[in-house]
Image: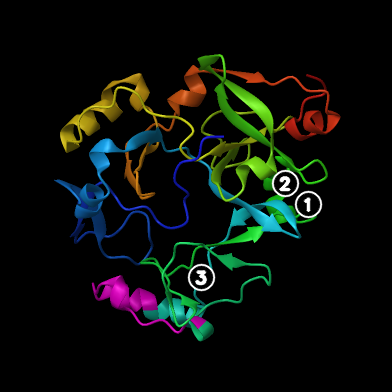
Amino acid sequence: MKRLGSVQRKMPCVFVTEVKEEPSAKREHQPFKVLATETISHKALDADIYSAIPTEKVDGTCCYVTTYKDQPYLWARLDRKPNKQAEKRFKNFLHSKENPKEFFWNVEEDFKPAPECWIPAKEIEQINGNPVPDENGHIPGWVPVEKNNKQYCWHSSVVNYEFEIALVLKHHPDDSGLLEISAVPLSDLLEQTLELIGTNINGNPYGLGSKKHPLHLLIPHGAFQVRNLPSLKHNDLLSWFEGCKEGKIEGIVWHCSDGCLIKVLDIQSTKQGVCLHEAHILMGKTDNKQICNMSGEEQL
């Protein structure tokens, strides 16, 4: 499968951001908001954003495929978070309107223990062998998805380690207007990040499956390219998000030639994911009964 950028850290915004002194609607105890301006960021320009590939930002939960127990494995996103004492110090620091990057963390003492199999995300900064927390005080990372772990039961529903396959949603090879659910070898997904979507993920914005017959799928990051995008001007993008059916998505992620990922979110999005709502979805033919069980279908 065609590979684009991998999501291993927080993606920067295509526009320069500024701090507004109003309480955050997203983060408790944060007395400010971070808003996008109309100026394209230096990071986006340095990554040659004008030549980048724009793709749909899918509304799910991030996953990663890498080796575990000598075979390809699906990993779930798990951020290490500070303990109560450190979190209180960090919130007080934010309340004083200081730059979160200037806060001093003692990674060995300030964070809750991680599972033994936890690994940090690849691209996060490290100092003296310790991962550096991001601006939210989290250390992004991954844990392997085991079949017996109820916490990740929806993750495990899309993989079969015996046959080393995963259920993946992608474009139909003969018709770009169709999406196809296929059984893809996990080895073909190695070192890729993907988005898990479905009935029990993020309120199921794409309307997949039902309570009685849940359906969950993986989508490789960058799988759905955005066509006919307007110019990279704040007002043009805002009009595109609000005024056309192609804009009824969570956001855009630009995949740059240097591997950098740049995003912009439609904060007023209806989260209708036009790629998933407008296209017909087909189940690829197979003789493998394990895939039937994974997909929640009795037969194909």
Relative to 26, say whether 210 is above or below.
Answer: above
- Looking at the rendered structure, the kind of residue marked 3 is Lys
Q: Nearer the viewer, mark 3 or mark 2?
A: 2
- Looking at the rendered structure, the kind of residue marked 1 is Lys
In the image, is residue 106 part of the stretch drawn in magenta?
Answer: yes
The residue singled out by tag 2 in the image is 156
| Horizontal side of residue 124 vs 25, given as left or right | right
- Of the numbered discs 3 and 2, the one sitting upstream in the chain is 3
- Looking at the rendered structure, the kind of residue marked 2 is Ser
In the image, is residue 27 part of the stretch drawn in magenta?
Answer: no
The residue singled out by tag 3 in the image is 81
Residue 19 percent coordinates (x, y) = 20, 60
The residue singled out by tag 1 in the image is 147
Nearest the eye: 137 or 262: 262
Can residue 278 be seen in this snapshot? Answer: yes
Which residues are drawn in magenta? 90-107
Relative to 248, say whether 261 is above or below.
Answer: below
| Horizontal side of residue 30 vs 231, given as left or right | right
- Of the numbered discs 3 and 1, the one sitting upstream in the chain is 3
**Crowding near the residue tagged with mark 3, few <14, some 14–19, many ≥20 C-alpha atoms within 10 Å:** many
Residue 92's image quarter?
bottom left
Asked if the residue under mark 2 is in contact with the one under mark 3, i.e. CB atoms within 8 Å, the reply is no
Q: Secondary structure at mark 3?
A: loop
Residue at x 17%, y 36% (from the top left corner): 233
Q: Secondary structure at mark 1?
A: loop
| Horizontal side of residue 103 vs 150, given as left or right | left
Numbered circle sitting on residue 53: none
Q: Residue furthest left?
A: 39
Asked if the residue under mark 2 is in contact with the one under mark 1, i.e. CB atoms within 8 Å, the reply is yes
